[in-house]
Amino acid sequence: MRGIILACVATLLCAGSLNAADRLVSPNGISYFPEYMTWKLIAPSYREDKGHIRIITGNGIAVAALQAGKKPLPDGSVLAKVAWKAEKHPSFPVATVPGAFAQVEFMVKDSRKYKSTGGWGFARFVGNDLKPYGKDAGFVSECFGCHIPVAKNDYLFTKPVKTP
Ligand code: HEC
């Protein structure tokens, strides 16, 4: 009996220690990508009205296509945009640096599944508890709507940052 109880406790502890982020899903069915910070940097950005410092990263498929100048990006491409609240560096106030985590957004390419939104699936996870954004799957019209002006660039605003 004691053995059974211990086994149960161990199972519960193990289940609890699984990264909770792995189980996060957006209302349109897109799961959180916990590895986005290991992807390659495409570019940083700064959004004045929101006071956000951001980086845009991409998985291997996306980065290879961007580097080769291939558009539209192939299925399997995923881009992440991570945002932090911009704040002054405490030891050097004219330097603006990332402060609290704000949110992370994803664009996932699947030209058949997401045909009605330019082949891109959208997802956003907000705050430190990574709350999936959107009351229902309809939230994507907000995302897609704002990305339409860059339809000619495969609905992407970001261009790879220049280096020598
Ligand atoms: C009001 C306009 C607007 C809305 C709404 C919007 N975006 Fe964007 N998005 C942008 C702009 C502008 C950029 C360029 C980089 C930046 O803003 O930092 C961008 C960039 C991105 C990128 C990086 C790839 C790229 O296109 O440069 C991702 C990923 C992204 N957005 C996801 C989303 C998701 C997911 C939603 C909805 C939950 C969304 N966006 C809603 C304007 C918008």
Image: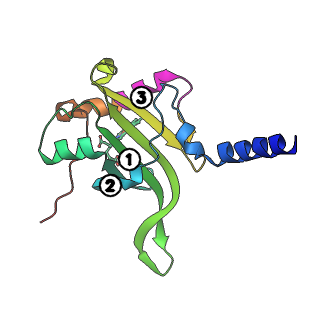
Q: CA distance from mark 2 to mark 1?
A: 9 Å
Q: Is residue 10 left or right of residue 108?
A: right
The quadrant of the picture occupied by the C terminus is bottom left
Q: Is mark 2 within 8 Å of ligand 1?
A: yes
> What amino acid is labelled 2 in the image?
Ser
Task: Bin the neighbour count of mark 1 within 10 Å (Cα to Cα): few under 14, some 14-19, many 20 and up.
Answer: many
Question: Is residue 75 one of those drawn in magenta?
Answer: no
Q: Is residue 41 left or right of residue 85?
A: left
Q: In this rendered view, identify the residue nearer to me: 151 or 22.
A: 22
Q: CA distance from mark 3 to mark 1?
A: 16 Å
Question: Is residue 136 one of those drawn in magenta?
Answer: yes
| Element marked by disc 1 | strand
Q: Quadrant of ligand 1?
A: top left
Residue 99 location, x and y as percent? 50, 63
Residue 75 location, x and y as percent? 26, 30
State the residue position of label 1: 81
Is residue 66 something one can see in this rendering? yes
State the residue position of label 2: 45
State the residue position of label 3: 142
What range is drawn magenta here? 134-144
> What amino acid is labelled 1 in the image?
Lys
Q: Residue at x 38, y 47 (%)?
A: 81
First of labels 2, 1 by sequence position:
2
Q: In this rendered view, identify the residue nearer to me: 59 or 147.
A: 59
The quadrant of the picture occupied by the N terminus is top right
Q: Is mark 1 within 8 Å of ligand 1?
A: yes
Q: Residue at x 47, y 71 (%)?
A: 88
